[in-house]
Image: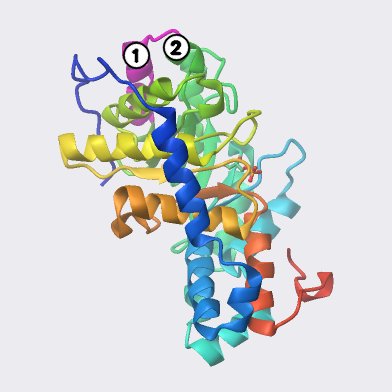
Amino acid sequence: AKHTALPLPTDLLDGVCISANSLAEHCRWGTRRYRLDSETANSSNDGKLYRLGWLLKAASLIDLTTLAGDDCPSNVVRLCHKARRPFAFAVLDKLEFEHGIDKDELHTAAVCLYPYQLAAAKSALDQIGASNRIRLACVATGFPSGQYGLESRLAEIRWAVEQGANEVDIVINRTLALQGRWSDVYEEVRAMREACGPSVCLKTILGVGELAAYETVYKASLVCMYAGADFIKTSTGKESVNATLPLSLVMLRAISEFHARTGRRVGFKPAGGIRTAADALDYLHLVQFALGPDWLQPNLLRIGASSLLGEIEKSAFRLLIGRDATAGDLPMA
Ligand SMILES: O=C[C@H](O)COP(=O)(O)O
């Protein structure tokens, strides 16, 4: 069951103060720990398997995204196929025959699109028998700016749900957040929660790069969770600053605070600018450190990314096949 809104405690946002130093220290440490260099990974079998395991985990958490003005059914259908078979056949065969991994179990968590592309994606996923494995996510509410009247933003959500979206990624109204009008942010997100209905997953995008201060990111995170968000998401990918480790840590601390106060587990979705395999592993580590290993599963963690999967595929190819992939090795990338 998806979350419902809870009343916003009146003193919730009083005295919030976040030290930039503690965030920076932790994020530097996190980065060092998971960046196995390719030499270590190639020379030691343990290092190789360790890295491979984390790469497969990262791939399984991706919301494979296309959000371009020139999206058409052709690239949307290819994206759905890629989500279902994320790696080249040479990689899948090695994983199956040498590591006992069932290649049917390897796929991304979701595809994420504009609402207009939902019909094409839904029919592609149905056709390849993947609708029960890969979630159909779409952005809504005047993405990416959110600078539209509430009624039209709510109508977009309803239309997306009618088109078959299982998950809706809304943007919060950054104007209200920057003005500190938290009860208005809460009411808007609560209305969006209602527009999704009880079975559609609501992800709230904060647009952290536009929120100006760590405290604002923390408060926006809490307000969205009280309003019924199932996930809080960093960014649209369209701001000039998107996901970063320190801003993510602020959101993870808010998730932890919310969990302590209410017993509810809310998911986290870093998105925007996460491109390399090492970036992805940094985020997995950060989440594991801040919230524990329970959060490393698709109902509590997603990575929103358009090009990351191709980089993970190249890393997996190098580890398993022992050379760099050429364009012909990765036909659908
Ligand atoms: O939600 C996902 C983001 O829009 C993707 O951003 P990206 O293209 O920088 O990976």
Q: Is residue 299 visible?
A: no
Tag 1 near tag 2, CB within 8 Å: yes
- Asked if the magenta segment contains residue 43, the reply would be no
Quarter of the figure with residue 184: top left
Above or below — where is 1 with respect to 262? below
Q: Secondary structure at mark 1?
A: helix
Percent across and percent down for residue 170 are: 48, 31
At horizontal 53% and vertical 41% (from top left) the residue drawn is 138
Percent across and percent down for residue 263 are: 16, 42
Left or right position of 77 against 25: right
The amino acid on which the numbered mark 1 sits, given as a three-letter code, is Trp
Q: Which residue is mark 1?
A: 182
Q: Is mark 2 within 8 Å of ligand 1?
A: no
Percent across and percent down for residue 23 are: 42, 36
Left or right position of 22 against 333: left
Q: Is residue 310 visible?
A: yes
Numbered tag placed on residue 176 in the rendering: 2
At horizontal 41% and vertical 39% (from top left) the residue drawn is 249
Figure disc tally: 2
Distance between the Cα atoms at labels 1 and 2?
7 Å
Closest to the observer: 115 or 258? 258
At horizontal 62% and vertical 36% (from top left) the residue drawn is 237
Give the residues in magenta. Answer: 179-195
**Which corner quadrant holds the C terminus?**
bottom right
